[in-house]
Image (spheres, rainbow, N blue to C red):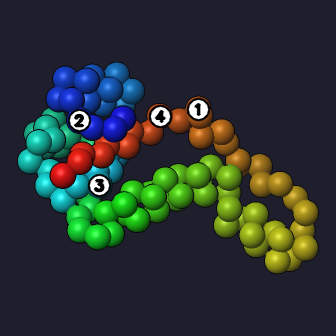
Amino acid sequence: MLGWDFNDGLNLIQQHHIKWVQSVSAGVDYFPLEEFEKNNVILTSASGLNSQRVANFVLLQCLSDSYSINETYINRINRKWKVPENIYDIREKILLFLEREV
């Protein structure tokens, strides 16, 4: 989700049991912090020149985890041509990305 709409955002969090929200903005005042705390939602944010890099890194880590990149890399080093069993399709997961233009 790009941008933040209070009602839509809360509905997404409650309906899909979202546990982590990454924002590329520095400020967090416009987020429903009390609702996040009540629902055990982690909010991380970024600021300054590196905010886009942080958001891209978060996406990279999500994809890396879904493809078991660490295990795949270790297998390749060891010349073990086995596909990790714990690879999953990220389309089966619910991810919420928030971005606010400053």
Residue occupying image coordinates x 18% and y 59%: 26
Residue highlighted by disc 1: 92
Judged from the image, the secondary structure of the residue bearing numbered disc 2 is loop
Q: Amino acid at mark 2?
A: Trp
Marked residue nearer the N-terminal end (4 or 2): 2
Judged from the image, the secondary structure of the residue bearing numbered disc 1 is helix
Marked residue nearer the N-terminal end (3 or 1): 3
Asked if the residue at tag 2 contacts the one at tag 1, i.e. Cβ–Cβ closer than 8 Å, the answer is no
Residue occupying image coordinates x 29% and y 55%: 24
* Picture quadrant of residue 25: bottom left
Judged from the image, the secondary structure of the residue bearing numbered disc 3 is loop
Circle nearer the viewer, 4 or 2 = 2
Marked residue nearer the N-terminal end (4 or 3): 3
Marked residue nearer the N-terminal end (3 or 2): 2
Q: Residues within 10 Å of mark 3 (few under 14, many from 20)?
A: many
Asked if the residue at tag 4 contacts the one at tag 1, i.e. Cβ–Cβ closer than 8 Å, the answer is no
Q: Amino acid at mark 1?
A: Glu
Marked residue nearer the N-terminal end (1 or 2): 2
